[in-house]
Image: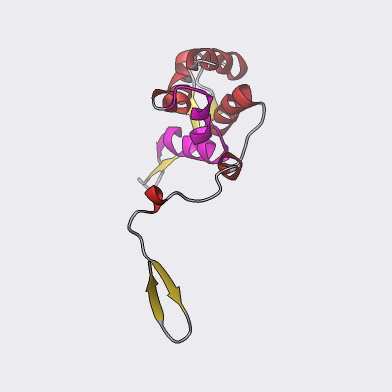
Amino acid sequence: MKPLLHAKISAKKFGGDPADYINIHNWFDQTKAHIPDARHRLVLHNAFGIFLCEQVFGEMVVMPNGSVKRMPYITNAYGTQISVRDIAEQHVLDDLGHIPTLSDCFEGVSDLQEKFVGKAKRLVISSKNVQIVD
């Protein structure tokens, strides 16, 4: 589903205008630019992606003590505060029908390939010494 259609669904469900929601839906689908098939959803269409979305899109609010805090909502065109988590969860549910964990997305990946380990060394720590193992 394209981000604009997601945004229209959000406006119908939560109120306001599709423009209130388009940035969130574009964010979820940005991975299509790098993986132009359904596999792009493995990156953000999961519980961890929803958590990240809430951190990125929550509104910044100045607290009474002058500190700034990111709140877990946006305010739509009608002035209603809408939970970013609710919007994000609906995006994933509309696309997948369920919300997978990040672990679910890594199922089928058996071993970490050498190119992702790099030149890292493994430490073996015992009560008597520390060894670096290749």
Q: Which stretch appears magenta?
A: 35-61
Judge whether residue 47 is colored magenta.
Answer: yes
User: Which part of the image, by quadrant, shows the C terminus?
Assistant: bottom left
Q: Quadrant of residue 22?
A: top left
Residue pushed farthest bottom? 128
Q: Is residue 129 magenta?
A: no
| Residue furthest right in the image | 97
Work out whether residue 2 or residue 53 is closer to the camera in this orientation and state it.
2
Q: Quadrant of residue 33?
A: top left
- Secondary structure mostly seen in the magenta stretch: helix
Tell me where residue 131 appears, x and y as whole percent.
39, 77
Of 45 and 62, the residue lying toward us: 45
Q: Which residue is pictured at 41% across the width and 83% down the height?
A: 129
- Location of the N terminus (image quadrant): top right
On screen, residue 15 versus residue 134, left or right, reads: right
Image position, residue 71 (x, y; %): 47, 38
* Near-viewer residue (87 or 106): 106
Residue 71 visible somewhere in the drawing = no
Going by the image, does 75 lie left or right of 65? right
Q: Residue furthest left?
A: 119
Residue 69 in percent (x, y) is at 41, 43
In the visual, does 65 lie left or right of 50? left
Query: Residue visible at 55% across and 15% down?
Result: 11
Q: Is residue 20 above or below residue 124?
A: above
Using the image, determine if residue 14 lies above or below residue 52: above
* Residue 13 percent across, percent down from the top left: 62, 17
